[in-house]
Structure formats: structure tokens, C-alpha cells
Amino acid sequence: MRILLKILFFPITLILTVLILFFDFICLLSTAVLSILSFVVFMIALGTIFILRETPEGIKIIVLAYLISPYGIPMFAAWLIAKIEGLNDLLKSI
């Protein structure tokens, strides 16, 4: 019975393994690009606060910079990839 389940789950684990590798690569590239973009947006926010004297707009831009920083959306994507990887490991251990 266990061998039958392994044969049944093999295509699923193969697809999940390829998807995890692809999404890890995309997450790595997007984190690098978004880190640079986050720095630029943060500098624009500081300019908005100190030069234009529009503090509420500057705070909104700082929140946007935080969301695209490596601690915002890319961290959520990495967490999601880790959960899918856990599911893949669970299927492989059967």
C-alpha cells in the first residue's frame, strides 16, 4: 500500500520540487530588486517629509517602502514557499 502511495504521489512531489526551485529563484531576484527600490522610495519619503513638509504623505510613502522591503511582501513569499516545501517533504516521507 505504501509503495502504491509513493507511485501515486511521485508526479505531485516532482512538480512541487520544480515549482519550489523556480519560486525560490524568483523570490531571490525580486528581493534584490525590491531592496534597491525600497531604498529609493524611502529617500523620496524623506524628501517629502523634510523638503516638501508633507508629513502624512511621507509616512504613507514610508509604509510603502516597508512593504516592498525584504521584511514586507518578500518575507511573506518566503514563508509561503517554506510552507509548500514542508508539504512537499510530508508527501515525500510517505
Image: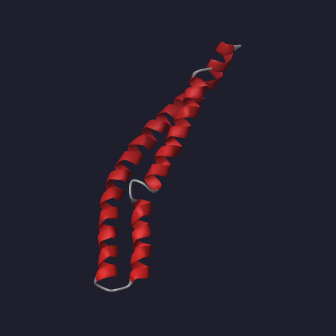
Residue 37 appears left or right of 10:
left
Q: Give whichever of 40, 21 is nearer the camera.
A: 40
**Residue 90 quadrant:** top right
Q: What residue lies at 33% left-to-right and 68% top-to-bottom?
A: 42
Q: Is residue 16 above or below residue 36?
A: above
Type of colouring: secondary structure
Q: How many marks?
A: 0
**Is residue 44 visible in this depiction of the protein?**
yes
Indicate the position of residue 67 as horizontal and vertical percent values. Answer: 44, 61
Q: Is residue 87 above or below residue 74?
A: above
Q: Is residue 35 above or below residue 6?
A: below
For the N terminus, give its image quadrant: top right
Q: What residue lies at 45% left-to-right and 50% top-to-bottom?
A: 75
Q: Is residue 43 above or below residue 22?
A: below
**Is residue 11 visible in this depiction of the protein?**
no
**Residue 71 quadrant:** bottom left
For the C terminus, give its image quadrant: top right
**Residue 52 quadrant:** bottom left
Residue 83 appears left or right of 32:
right
Q: What residue lies at 34% left-to-right and 86% top-to-bottom?
A: 53
Q: What residue lies at 39% left-to-right and 65% top-to-bottom?
A: 65
Residue 10 appears left or right of 29:
right
Indicate the position of residue 46 as horizontal and vertical percent values. Answer: 31, 75
Indicate the position of residue 21 as horizontal and vertical percent values. Answer: 43, 36
Residue 82 appears left or right of 8:
left
Residue extending furthest toward the right = 1
